[in-house]
Image (tube, rainbow, N blue to C red):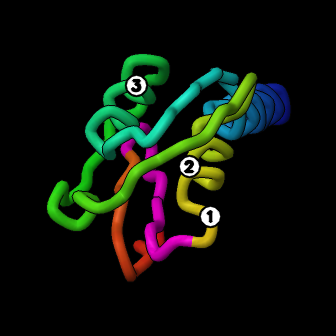
Amino acid sequence: MKNLYLFIFCLALITRVGFAQQKDLKLISANFQKATIDQFVADLESKTDYHFFYDQVQFDSLKITLQATDKSVTSILDLAFSNTDYHYSVVNQQIFLTRGRNIKT
């Protein structure tokens, strides 16, 4: 009987871990033409369950131009910040945007 309880516990734990890794699999589409960070973040927040944190002053000169179809939010962030000094870190349903330094989670 103890083995049955142990098996059920392990199965529940494995299933929970599997679902946690699929959080970012929601695919979204976005089209930005010289968007400010506020426009960019507002659009992504409206399409996902993520909430963004950033210092607007650090991003005042950033203009984002990209088109993405059926991409994860992290893929869109990778496209937006490629070849720049801007970084992001994801913790649960929160995304932290930084300039110059990357936050290690």
Q: Are marks 3 and 1 in contact (CB under 8 Å)?
A: no
Vertical position of residue 18 compared to residue 31: above or below: below
Q: Amino acid at mark 1?
A: Ser
The amino acid marked with disc number 3 is Asp
Question: Which residues are drawn in magenta?
Answer: 84-94
Residue bearing the label numbered 2: 77
| Residue drawn at 23 percent across, 67 percent down | 58
Q: Which residue is mark 3?
A: 43
Q: Position of residue 62 (x, y in %)?
A: 36, 58
User: Label 1 belongs to which residue?
Assistant: 82
- Front residue of 69 and 18: 69
Q: Position of residue 46 (x, y in %)?
A: 38, 18
Task: Please state which of residues 11 and 7 is positioned toward the viewer in this rendering.
Answer: 11
Quadrant location of the N terminus?
Answer: top right
Eye-nearest disc, 2 or 1: 1
Q: Is residue 15 left or right of residue 48?
A: right
